[in-house]
Amino acid sequence: MASVPVLEIRNVSKHFGVVKALTDVSFSLERGEIHALCGENGAGKSTLMNIIAGVLQPHEGDILIDGKPVKVTSPAVAQSLGLGLVHQEIALCPDATIAENMFMAATNRRRKLFMNYGKQARDAQAIMNRLAPLDVRANVGDLSISNQQLVEIAKALTLDCRVLIFDEPTAALTETEAQTLFGIIRDLKAHDISIIYISHRMAEIFSLCDRVTVFRDGRYVSTERVADVTPDEVVRRMVGREITQLYPPKQTQDERSAEAILTVRDLGDGARFHDVSFDLRKGEILGIGGLIGSGRTEIAEGICCLRPTTKGVVTLEGPRLHSRSYADAVKAGIVYLSEDRKGSGIFLDMPIAQNISVLDLKALTGPAGLLNAKAEADLAHRFVRRLGIRIGGMDIPVSSLSGGNQQKVAIAKQLAVNPKVILMDEPTRGIDVGAKSEIHRLLRDLARSGIGVVVISSELPELLGLCDRVLVIREGSVMGEIEGDAMSEEAIMRLASGIAGHNNSKASGHAA
């Protein structure tokens, strides 16, 4: 007899108004199995996981544990049933310590009058040491995005779970951190804990998982053993079409220009980055690589006045910029797409149209000082069509969209002000392969239209496949630039890790 699945989903449906998030989907998870769940953003993966975790309730269908129907009416009930979820979007209390965040669920359940904070810190540190050497007494709000993601994972490891759901767990992690996580997941499997693993990264799925299930447009498509299917077949089932070229063609030799649209000279903030100099040429996509924590984000924030600088000059199409705030930078023509979509990229509770228009309300305001609602709606509709944003209505809050569509709204917000230069920090983090391809083509179209495009990415294949040149940052300094035939993962990592010398890796052109 076949063993009874530890978790089974039967014919589950869920809708949000007229939008059908899930239609008659089924899924099963065996004991001690790592089961990948794949699909484009909006395919219904996160909706199903939130139903399993008790965050949402299905309109139809059943959930079974060990073959017995259960009602998962809340996250607390889910945890009592041994179901744990590591969210894609970070959901931590920034004013609490790492230890307090990790044991928040246990604290809520406790009945004792006094808390033994010393024991809590020791238990938290023992778990955190499996992932990274973070001091659990530190406040979460003081951590980087990648370290906050590690706290989310550590929080799940404190739960006595039979089933753990990982939703894009490596999106904000370095390669070393990701490999550590994979070792922990394999160890959990060895102890008969079952894992649902959601990821858009095929290499992770095919090295880690036993089976893969594909959803498309809120419907179940297929389940296969990983050994019996190829990455191309999985992608084809996800998108319902061939992804023939993930990256659009780069600049040709004839398209290359020596003219700079943006020039940065000797920029520094006295703390996180120093003496940064580079040119962004017209028509190119310039990549910025380096390890997480190297200063990549801080440099971008310094250029667009989100972070104060102590020295250096930034020029845009010739004249020197004298911006003192981000509003000044936007007015001059420089915008920044944050890596933290949820925290600073979009307004989750606001409608789509208001998110897209928010950077330049003056352009939509009439002589009487009143916002022209029709002009705002027309602007939003134009970018919804241009970026292929899937929506159920222009008035719904952005929080109701999938992660990929939220990211497209964040990009639309930047493009709505007709920028001259756009700095994009992790523009495709947490986005499925089909949406990535669309955004890559959009970025190339923007570059060819004359907009300066800078892409900061932790994904080396993205830097190499998308960008015409790559600057590599280490400890707040530009270690070198790579272009042409010299562009390789090894070349980037040699500079990022300090193996190669300062400014000594360039295929052609001048040093950064």
Image: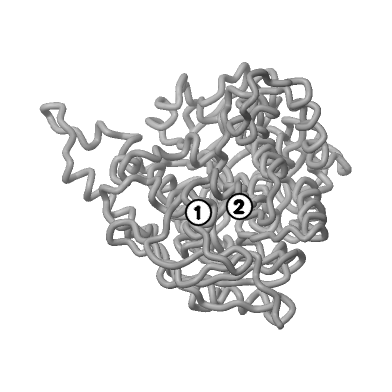
How far apart in space, not on screen, are marks 1 and 2 (Cα)?
8 Å
Query: Are the residues at dot 1 and dot 2 in contact (C-beta closer than 8 Å)?
Result: yes
The x, y position of residue 232, in whole percent, is 63, 77
The 10 Å Cα crowd at callout 1, few under 14, some 14 to 19, many 20 or more, is many
Picture quadrant of residue 147 = top right
Identify the image quadrant of residue 37: bottom right
Residue matched to label 2: 81
**Between 118 and 17, which is closer to the camera in this rendering?**
118
Q: Is residue 426 visible?
A: yes
Residue shown at 62% from the left, 35% from the top: 297
- Secondary structure state at the residue bearing disc 1: loop
| Residue 258 makes an appearance in the image | no
Q: Nearer the viewer, residue 373 or 497?
A: 373
Quarter assignment of residue 265: top right
- Specify the amino acid type for callout 1: Val
Q: Which mark is residue 72?
A: 1
Q: Residue at x 27, y 51 (%)?
A: 394
Q: Position of residue 476 (x, y in %)?
A: 72, 30
Q: Earlier in the sequence, mark 1 or mark 2?
A: 1
Q: Residue at x 58, y 34 (%)?
A: 92
Relative vertical location of residue 430 with respect to residue 25 in this rendering, above or below: above
